[in-house]
Amino acid sequence: MTKAKISASIELEYETFGDPKNPALLLVMGYTAQMVAWDEEFCRMFAAKNLFVIRFDNRDCGLSTKFDDVKVDTNAVITAALMQEPMPPVPYTLSDMAGDAVGLLDHLKIDRAHVLGASMGGMIAQVMTIEHATRVRTLTSVMSMSGEPEYGQSAPEAMNALLSVPPADRAAYIAHAPIYQAFHSKKYRSDENSKQAAARDFDRMYYPQGAQRQLAAIYSSGYRTEQLRAVKTPTLVIHGKDDTLITPSGGERTAELIPNAKFVLVDDMGHDLPKPLWSDFVELVADFVAKN
C-alpha cells in the first residue's frame, strides 16, 4: 500500500494487484468504507482475469486525507436536496471525489480504466463517466442509484442501521457490527463475518468523523438523470434482490437511464457482496469488460 499525491491538499492511500501492463480495473468503495472492504482475495480473483486491479481509500476515510476541521450541517443539506431548495455550503461533492479517482489514474499513468463502484462508489463511478468520459473504458455500477430520491428508497431499519453511531471502544465497535446485517444478504449474513470485518476496519483506521461530510457529498450532488441519459460508455448495472438500503429500483432506474446498459439482479445479494457470490460476480464483470 502506498500514497498518491492527487493535489496540494489530497493524498489517497491505494494498493494494486496484478500486472500493470494489463487493462486497469479501478474499484471505488462506498460510504465510510475503507478500501479493504474490497477483500484482497476478491481483488486477486480479478487480477487472475488479466486485469490490473486498483483499490483505494476515498477522501475522509481510511488512510487518505481527512477534513478534520471542516464542519457541515448534514441535516440542512439533506433537507435542501429533498425539497430542491438552494444548497448550503458543503466541504466537497461527488464531483470532487470523482476527480480524486481520476487523479489516482493520472498518478499511475493510466489513460483509461474499467471503473467499478459500489453504493456511493457507484455514484462516484457514474460521475467519473459523466465528467471524465475519456478516462472510463466501462462503467460497472453496483448497488447504487441515479441520485433521484424516488428510486432505491431505503427501508427504515436499513437507514437507521447505516446512520447508527459506531462506538469508539474496540470491543463495543465489534459487538455493534451485526446491526448492519439489516441490509445484508438474507442467506449469507453472519455475525462472525460482520465482527471480523469490524475488527479489521477498527484496527486499520477508526474514523467516524468523515461520515457526515461524505453523506453531504451524496445529497448535495443532485440528480444525474439527464447526464446519465447522455452516457455512451458501455455500462453494466448490478443489484442485489435483498438490498434494503438502496432497494433494487435504484439499480433498475440507473440501467433504464443509461443507453444500452445491461442490468443484472442477483439472488441472495443484499447491500453487500458475500464471499459465496464472488466467483459468479467476478466472472460476470470480467466477461463484460473483456468484451468492451
Image: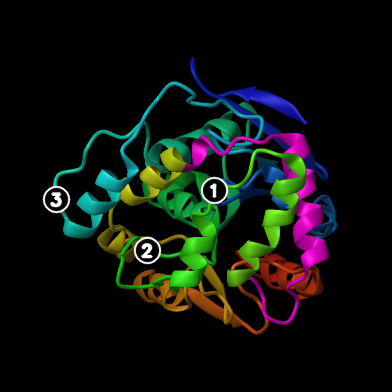
Residue 165: which numbered mark, if any? Answer: 1
Residue 260: which numbered mark, if any? Answer: none
Mark closest to the chain's N terminus, 2 or 1: 2
In which quadrant will I find the N terminus? top right
Tag 3: Cα neighbours inside 10 Å, few (<14), some, or many (≥20)? few
Residue 85: which numbered mark, if any? Answer: 3
The stretch drawn in magenta includes residue 284:
no
Asked whether residue 97 appears in the rendered view, the answer is yes
Marks 2 and 1, how far apart at CA: 26 Å
The residue at the point 17 percent across, 58 percent down is 83
Image location of residue 182, percent across then percent down? 59, 71
Element carrying mark 3: loop
The stretch drawn in magenta includes residue 202:
yes
Name the amino acid, label 2: Ser
- Left or right: 131 as drawn, with respect to 125: left
Instruction: Write down the region rendered in magenta.
Output: 184-211
Q: Is residue 259 above or below residue 10?
A: below
